[in-house]
Image: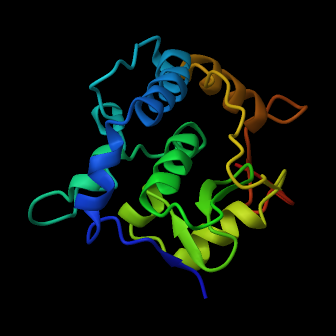
Amino acid sequence: MQEYYDLKKNWRKVKRHIGHPDVEAILVRDFNRYTWGRWRKKFQPGMVPHEFEYCDWCCGHRGPMPKFWQYTKHSACHWLVNFSLRLAERVEPDRPWRIITSDSHSTVWDGYDLLFDFNLQAMGSHPERCFDLAYYGSARAELLPGELLDVYFAEHWKREQKRLEKEQKGTDGELHLRSVVGETQERI
């Protein structure tokens, strides 16, 4: 049974490692590949990923926002996973942390039953779902303990919009919608 490393409960322990030069350098390098690729905006030292949050996943939350939410960004798990790995290695150094990744999700896993994941933990997703998305998704990989994921520039939002429009159009030029599993198409 998978569970999350409780970032809210252990925030003091986690926070003291966020400013470490190696951890911050990876966050800035990788997340800048997301923000620059997506919107041509620079992510610089001292910034947090939540500054670029445009999705309303946290709007229903009551009370103060948990501090670890500052390091979340909807749909950017692949650009935050190396940061999470280096942070997990500092917070719990005796565990063999590694990245598991797929097209659907990337997260940090100790190889047994513990996940170090900011995004899906913050969004209230069950740890088993987090694991399944990363471990059983398409184009999946389990990296060696300590190995970083190669990340590239994110697709610009305009290019993504055009690609999605093209994918939705059938060969006859009419708009088609794909089912959730992508196996069938229905005409509108």
Relative vertical location of residue 74 with respect to residue 36 in this rendering, above or below? below
Q: Residue furthest bottom?
A: 1
- The answer to whether 155 appears left or right of 31 in the picture is right
Count of numbered badges drawn on the protein: 0
- The answer to whether 60 appears left or right of 138 in the picture is left
Tell me where residue 87 appears, x and y as whole percent: 46, 49
Seen from the viewer's position, the closer of residues 26 and 13 is 13
Q: Residue at x 50, y 15 (%)?
A: 36
Relative vertical location of residue 127 with respect to residue 180 in this rendering, above or below? below
Rendered image coloring scheme: rainbow
- The answer to whether 5 appears left or right of 188 in the picture is left
Query: Can residue 180 be seen in the rendering of this structure?
Result: no
Tell me where residue 77 appears, x and y as whole percent: 54, 46
Tell me where residue 164 appears, x and y as whole percent: 68, 32
Q: Residue furthest front?
A: 94
Q: In the rendered image, which quarter contains the N terminus?
A: bottom right
Q: Residue furthest right?
A: 171
Q: Residue at x 46, y 22 (%)?
A: 35
Query: Can residue 108 be seen in the rendering of this structure?
Result: yes
Residue 113 placement: quadrant:
bottom right
Q: Residue at x 44, y 71 (%)?
A: 5
Residue 13 placement: quadrant:
bottom left
Relative vertical location of residue 85 with respect to residue 19 in this rendering, above or below? below
Seen from the viewer's position, the closer of residues 135 and 12 is 12
Seen from the viewer's position, the closer of residues 168 and 142 is 142
Tell me where residue 112 appears, x and y as whole percent: 67, 78
